[in-house]
Image (cartoon, rainbow, N blue to C red):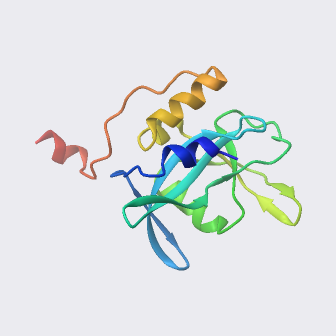
Amino acid sequence: MCKEIYEKNENQESSDTLPFHWEFGKEEITLKVSSYAYGNGLAVLMYSQREGELELFDDLTVNLPDRYGLKPQEAFVSGDFTRDKLAFIQENRLGKVLPGQAHSGFSTYTPVAFDLSRLARYDREGVEEFCRQWGLDIPKEQGKPTGKKKRERER
């Protein structure tokens, strides 16, 4: 799958987290971006902090054998807790839900056009490597989200 992400993050701490609300409560999530070994499709993984270390929480995306004509920055959302994941994507402006769905086995998957510049706020290195693999322009550096509104920052 995305072996390099697991190795890179075994003992890494992160301060940039996003709240993920699901049926079992709320988790603070760190996003990691990579590409799948088969087809180089966009892989977005969700990590949570456990005992001072990042631990894989869940896959945000899934690698389907046929990419269904998706663009490089587009991916299918993993079938587990799909509604919660789509809400997470929309609430954090990580991408736009696309029309249609794909079917594989007994599962249905929803496509999302991810905003690479937004993902880069949480994993710049991963997004830059993904863009290099696909020959895409690397998103320009943006400030980290501060939670403050524009008016408050201008004061």
Query: Taking 116 as reference, is 121 left or right?
Result: left
Above or below 83: residue 93: above
Q: Quadrant of residue 29?
A: bottom left
Above or below 154: residue 21: below
Q: Residue furthest bottom?
A: 24
Residue at 37% from the left image edge and 51% from the top image edge: 14
> Is residue 72 shown to the viewer in this render?
yes
In x, y percent, where is residue 103? 86, 57
Nearer to us in this view, 57 or 118: 57
In x, y percent, where is residue 137? 54, 21
In x, y percent, where is residue 40? 72, 34
Q: Quadrant of residue 154?
A: top left
Nearer to us in this view, 51 or 40: 51
Residue at 36% from the left image edge and 62% from the top image edge: 52
Query: Taking 106 as reference, is 11 left or right?
Result: left
Residue at 80% from the left image edge and 61% from the top image edge: 108
In x, y percent, where is residue 144? 32, 41
Q: Residue furthest left?
A: 155
Nearer to us in this view, 33 or 2: 2
